[in-house]
Amino acid sequence: MGLLKSRNPKKAAITDPYIPSITDDYLKSLEGKKPSPQLQELCVQKKEVFLTQKTLAQEFNIYTLMYPIFNLNSIKQAEVESLLSLKFNVLAFDRSVVLKSTYEREHHMTLLLMHMFHYLDLIREFHIPEENLFRLIGTLARKYRNVPFHCFYHAFNVTQTMFYFITTCNIKKIFGDSKIEVLAMLVACLIHDTDHPGLNNMFQKKANTKLAQIHATSILENHHLNQGLCILSQPDCDILVNMGEAEQVIFYGYLQKMVMATDLAFHKHILEELEPHKQQIKKEFLKDKPQIDPTQILCVLAICMKCADLSNEIRPGDIAFLWAARVNDEFFQQTDKERALGLPVTPFMDPEKITVAQEQQGFIKGLCKPLYGALAECFPSIDACLQQMNTNLVEWEKRLELTKKPGVKPSSEIKSGFIEEQQTPIESGWNEDQLRPLKQFFAIPLGMVGSKDKKRTKRTNRDSLKEPHGPRLSDTQGSDKSNSKDKTS
C-alpha cells in the first residue's frame, strides 16, 4: 500500500484514465478552487464514492503487475495465426467493441506479445519467468505516451513485424541454433521508442530541451534505450534473471546496436556497413546450417531493426494509409508547437506546405525501398514485402495524379494526395469500406488558399489532433525522436 500512499491523489484524480470521470465542476474543486454553494452538497456526496473508486482502480493496476493473472489460452487460434502475417492490424484494437477499455487493450496486446516469446521457444530456452515478462510488457506499455504515432501501438506493430521477419521470412535460420539474437530482436522492438513524446530530434535541438542537453547525438534513441534498460533492470521485470553474465553482455550489446540503429542519422552508415557482407549472408542463409561471423550478425540485426521500424509501407494498403494518417497527425502537432514557441517550422511537417501523397512517395523511394532492397538481397523471402511496398507506392502515385486532373483544385491549394469524395471519386484497388476511414483523414484540404478557408482548415486540423490514440502512456511531458524517420517509421 506504500505505492498507493506515495501517489498524489489530486493529480491521480485528474490524470489517471482508469478513474471514473466526474463533472468538470467537481474536478475544479479538486484542483483547489472553492466549489460554488450549489455544488458543495454534490461534492460531499461524491467524494466518498470517488475516493473509493480511485483507490480500487489504483490498487487494481498495481496489483495486476504485482500479482499477474493471465491466460494465454484465451487468445483465439485465428488471431494467433494472423501474427504470422503482415495483414495483422493492431490499430483495429483502437475501435474494438470487445476491448473497450485501455486496460483491456493493453492486456490483450500483452498476451499476444507473450505468445510470440512462447512461439519462438524463448521462455524455455532462457528460463524466463512468465510473470516477469508480463510485468515488463505492461510497464513498457504504460511508459509509452498517448501520442498519435509513437504510442504503444507502434511498439507492438514493430515487434509483430520483426516476429514476421523471424518466422514467416525465416530470418532466425541465419543465427543457427542460437536464440539470444532472436530474444534481443523482440525486446529491442518493444523498448525502441519508450517514452517518445511525439517531437523529433530536430525539435529537441531547436528547443534545447533537457534531453538535448543530456545527449549530444541520437537524443531520443539514447533516451529510449536508457528508459528501456531502467525497466529491464527492475527485479520484477527482469526477464534475464536466469541468464549467465556472459550472455547478458552479448544481449545488451545487441540491444544497444538495434535501438541506436533506429536513428535516421545512421541510415546511410547501416547500408554501407551491410554492403560488403550481403552476398556472404545470402549464401549462408541458403545453406542447411548457416554460419556468419559476429560482424555480420550485427549487420543483420541493424538492418532488420531499421526495416521493422519503417514497416508501415509493407502492410496492405488500407492499414498502411491508417498509419500514414497517424504520422501526419503527429507531424502537425509538432509544427503547432514549433509555431507556439517561435521555432523554425520543420518543412516536411508543415500542413500548409506539404503534399501528403508526394511526401509518402518520396519517403518510400528514398528510405524504405533502399532498406528493404538491401534486406531482400540477403534474405530472398523478403521479396513479398517489396511487392506490397510497390503496390502502395502506385496507390500514392495515383492520389498524387488526382490533384492534377481537370476540374480538381490545383495542388497548390490541396495539400493532400486524397481528394474530397464530392470533388473527385477515389479510384483504387480497395473497396469503399476500406477507404472510408482513410478519406475521413486525407479529405481535409491542408493549407487552403484564402484566409477564410485557411482559418477553417487550421481549426479542423487542430480539433482532429485532440482525439486520443493508442493505449495509455505516461502522463509526464517530454522529448522526441528522429527527423523524417517518423515519416512512417
Image: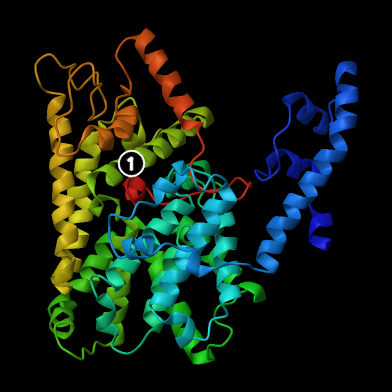
Outermost left residue: 406
Q: How many marks?
A: 1
Q: Quadrant of residue 60?
A: bottom right
| 10 Å crowding of disc 1: few (<14), some (14-19), many (20+) | some
Name the spot of residue 190 as percent of width and height, x first.
46, 64
Q: Residue at x 60, y 68 (%)?
A: 135
Is 436 drawn above or below residue 425 in the view shown?
below
Is 485 drawn above or below residue 2 in the view shown?
above
Name the spot of residue 50 as percent of width and height, x first.
80, 39
* Residue bearing mark 1: 322
Name the spot of residue 486 as percent of width and height, x first.
36, 48
**Residue 195 in sight in this render:** no
Give the residue type at disc 1.
Answer: Leu
**Residue 149 in sight in this render:** yes
Q: Nearer the viewer, residue 114 or 148?
A: 114
Colour treatment of the image: rainbow
Q: Nearer the viewer, residue 30 or 18?
A: 18
Is 331 drawn above or below residue 76 in the view shown?
above
Q: Nearer the viewer, residue 227 or 175?
A: 175
Name the spot of residue 130 as percent of width and height, x first.
56, 76
Q: Quadrant of the N terminus?
A: bottom right
Residue 78 falls left or right of residue 406: right
Q: Residue at x 35, y 11 (%)?
A: 453
Q: Residue at x 80, y 41 (%)?
A: 10
Residue 5 falls left or right of residue 392: right
Q: Nearer the viewer, residue 70 or 24?
A: 70
The secondary element bearing badge 1 is classed as helix
